[in-house]
Structures are given as structure tokens and as C-alpha cells.
Image (tube, rainbow, N blue to C red):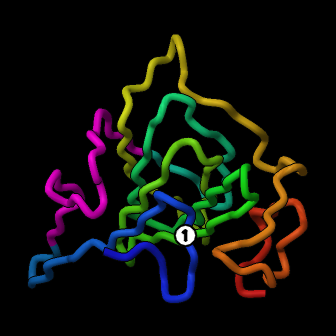
Amino acid sequence: MLTGKQGIKMLNGIKVKPIVRLLDERGFFCEVMRTDWKDLFEEDKIEQGNHSFTYPNIIRAWHKHLKGQVDYFLALKGSIKIGVFDEKTNELNEIVSSGLNLQIVRVPGHYWHGFKALGDEPAMLIYFTTNLYDPTNPDEERRPWNDPTLIPKSINGKKDDARVGKPWDWNYPIHK
């Protein structure tokens, strides 16, 4: 179980679990969710599974959950950049997840979170939630994807990142 790449400080409750692929001449098989993965799920109980298809460069952000929901993201195809922001500490985690490197990312819903589809192909992901969605009483608070008031003081635990102290820019190339 990993909680982040080497040297990356993750927000409390954020977890990243690599998925093991079993390859043979037919393709591969992998388990994507097991209730005995206590290192990932802790005491969470999955209530709903969803499938999302997102065109390249589309940003689906920001929102948070008000009733204790936890989300589990698994990119199946393409790549996504997941952003998670703690408004109490102004810390931000940025996690790139891809169908080429399967992993489940656990995001406690009290953090502002969202994602951007990277690259030139659509991103497909499934995500699991610990609460059922109620369209008559949605468990969400939203803010615009380009909200100028979302200004991180650190990104993945680093205060010297060039993006620190500026409004979060989903389109800023991570490699700069």
C-alpha cells in the first residue's frame, strides 16, 4: 500500500493503492476492489459505483461532500490529473492516474476535489462512493474549476513549487 510517491506528502486520508495486473497471452486480469483491503478502505463501505467518460482537456472540478462521503477513483483508459485541496491548510495534492498504471485513489469528500482529462484521448474511469447519490438532495458544494480564490500554500508537500501562492491552474504543465 502506498500513500504517495517517494517524497510526496499526502493530505490526511488520501491513499493511493497500485493495482496488480496478472498478464498472460490472453491479456490481463486484475482485482479492482476487495472489502478485505483494509489498508485502503479502512471502515468505509462502498454504496455506489459510477462510470465516467471525459473528453481530452475537460476539467471536472471543484466540489466537496458535506455528509462524510469518500470517493475512490480508478482511471481505466487515458490519464487524469486529480486535484485535492484542503481549504483549512491551503495544501493541495496532485495525483496523476492512468489506465497504463492502474491505481485506486482514495479521496475523503470533505476536501475540494476534481480532475482533468490529460492527453489526446478521452479518459474513462470508474469511481466508487460511500454514500448513495440523491438527486433531490445532492451531497455537494461546488465552486468553479478556475476559482481564483483557491491558492495553495504547498503542492504535494512542497512549498517551493512555482505554482504555490498563485490561483490553481489546471492547465499549467506539471513538467515546468
Determine if the magenta segment contains residue 53: no
**Residue pictured at 71% horizontal, 72% vertical:** 155
Is disc 1 surrounded by few (<14), some (14 to 19) or many (20+) residues within 10 Å? many
Q: Horizontal and vertical percent for residue 114?
A: 61, 51
> Between 44 and 103, which is closer to the camera in this rendering?
44
Determine if the magenta segment contains residue 30: yes
Answer above or below: position of 41 versus 22: above
Q: Horizontal and vertical percent for residue 102?
A: 35, 71
Image quarter where the N terminus lies is: bottom left
Answer above or below: position of 55 versus 67: below
**Residue pictured at 64% horizontal, 74% vertical:** 156
Describe residue 110's horizontal placement relative to residue 34 as left or right.
right
The stretch of residues the image draws in magenta is: 29-51
> Between 42 and 155, which is closer to the camera in this rendering?
42
Q: Horizontal and vertical percent for residue 11?
A: 56, 63
Looking at the image, how many numbered discs can be counted on the residues? 1
> Between 172 and 107, which is closer to the camera in this rendering?
107
Answer above or below: position of 154 versus 169: below
* Amino acid tagged 1: Met
Dot 1 corresponds to which residue? 10
